[in-house]
Image: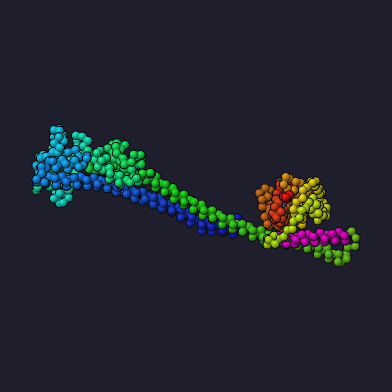
Amino acid sequence: MNSSLRKVSFLIITIIVLPVVVFSLFEIGNLRQNEKIIQDIYRNQLNAILYSINQYSDDVISSLAVRIENSSSEINSPAKTDLSATIKELPSVKGLLQFDNKQKLISSVPESCCDTIVLREITRMIEQNKKIITQLKTYLQGGYRKIQPVVNPSGNLQWIIFITHVRNKELTNLLIIDPVKFISQVLDPKIQEIAKGKFDIAAYRAGDELPFYTSNKKFKAAKIDEREAFWLLINYRMGIGLKEITIADLTSGRLKRNLIIVGIMDLILLFGAWLIFRNIRKQVELSQLKSDFVSNVSHEIRTPLSLITIYIETLEMGRVRDEKKVKEYYSVILNETSRLSGIVNRILSFSQIESKKRKYSFAQSDLNEIVENASMSYGYTLENRGFKYIFQPEQNLLPFKADKEAVTDAIVNIVDNAMKYSIEIKEIIVRTGKSEKHVFVEVEDKGIGISEKHQKYIFDKFYRVTEMNLANKVKGSGLGLAIVKHILDAHDGRITVKSKPGQGSIFRLSFPVN
Ligand code: ADP
């Protein structure tokens, strides 16, 4: 990597890659924190719903307490009849016992509500909870009726104590309710209203894994996110969860989605950074190739020019008398002049291609004829440089549409390269051939060959292989194959190369026949 590329890489890493990495790490940390906050908010909301169910239960019993107080206050009607009608309003109530200030039982509805054993238990409980009862009375005097559940040691029914104020007396009420009925009949409508198809709400007996009540028939136990005790029902708990998904799944799903988005954005940014780097690298390489091109071309022009100058000066001085020698000098001058014009033509041709000004005029042509014409321009040089030249034409080639001059240029370029890059075995075979839809011309040499890693670049403008000694020594512009490829593209044709370092190369130019 050269120094300007190193600088660019350093800049890209510090301006794009590092900020992207730091920002992503920061974002990922933030996302996790946000998800935790969202999870807490969800949990608080679910807790608030459970709280509202407890609040509702409390309200139901409080309003029953008010009605019981009012029924007991009716002077003209027999209190018991009223009380039993009042407590029947709430389906889950099994009975109500009232005690006076001295903890003496003064009424029980219905009368059959409790057998003697239960009654004894209740009386003992009232005795034991005197302190609580005094507290409840104090609350009531302060304007607040507290509903107090107490443990029922003799069964599953729930005992609830509250105080009523009847005709200047404070009565202690013991309400006996069936918790299962209370939940599934009294609380159910409210629970359904709250759940509204969004939540699953369930009720459990303490210690049970499975609920005895659920707001939704297709309830799944694993979806319960929060649990809370019933305020009024000792040993009963309620649970709530989101209907379709648990909070953990919901937040982890969101987290995953957000992480994926951050990941994709990072990839896009890093891909962009890589694209920028690749483009800059290409430009740097191209400018390097261009500067190599200028020095190569100057060399290429300088050598024939100085040869021409030397030979003309020698001839002009009239020092060479030998006729044979004079002829030889003229032929060198001719050779070098045609080399010079070849270089200039190539540069002109390339500049026409670059400015998209090169025009082609196509006509039905015969490939063998084009090769034979081309061989006239390189035949002399081949012979002069001691090359063995073999032409193997395929008979009955179909005609194809070609700009003859351009195709000749292409073939001359390829043969020229074959000569330039052959040292030991000086043999060039040119053959034509056909496939189903193409005619082709192949130029085979036994020269230095091209390694595979370079083969895909040799058709790029200015590209030259400099790794082998000869390739390095031979002067060139790196334009020849780029021009050939352009000519082939204009003919909808293809140029391919088969080559092995040290063994030679075969370049094939194929043209479509229709
Ligand atoms: P140049 O003016 O350098 O010959 P070209 O575009 O014609 O430019 O060729 C590009 C490069 O491909 C050459 O520099 C050379 O390394 C390689 N090349 C082309 N033809 C041959 C060949 N017949 N044998 C070996 N190498 C070749």
Res 128 visible = no
* Depth order, front residue of 113/505: 113
Using the rendered view, name the quadrant where residue 71 is placed: top left
Provide residue 488's location: percent of width, then percent of height: 71, 53
Give the residues in magenta.
325-352
- Any magenta on residue 332? yes
Whole-percent x, y for residue 468 in the image: 70, 51
Residue at 40% across / 50% down in the picture?
A: 32
Give the side of residue 482 with respect to residue 396, left or right. Answer: left
Q: What residue do we see at 22% from left, 45% from top?
A: 60
In front here: 178 or 25? 178
Residue closer to the observer: 20 or 260:
260
Q: Main secondary structure of the magenta part?
A: helix
Q: At x 42% / y 46%, what residue is drawn? A: 253
Query: Residue 177, located in which quarter of the rendered image?
Result: top left
How is the rendered protein coloured? rainbow
Is 110 situated above or below 273? Answer: above
Magenta highlight on residue 119: no
Q: Horizontal and vertical percent for residue 472?
A: 71, 54
Total numbered labels placed on residues in the image: 0
Q: Is residue 123 above or below residue 464?
A: above
Q: Where is residue 133 in the image (x, y as percent from the top left)?
A: 14, 44
Task: State left or right for residue 94 relative to residue 335.
Answer: left
Residue sitting at x 15%, y 51%: 142
Q: Is residue 157 visible?
A: yes
Q: Nearer the viewer, residue 149 or 382?
A: 149
Q: Which residue lies furthest to the bottom in this view?
A: 317
* Quarter of the picture holding the N terminus: bottom right
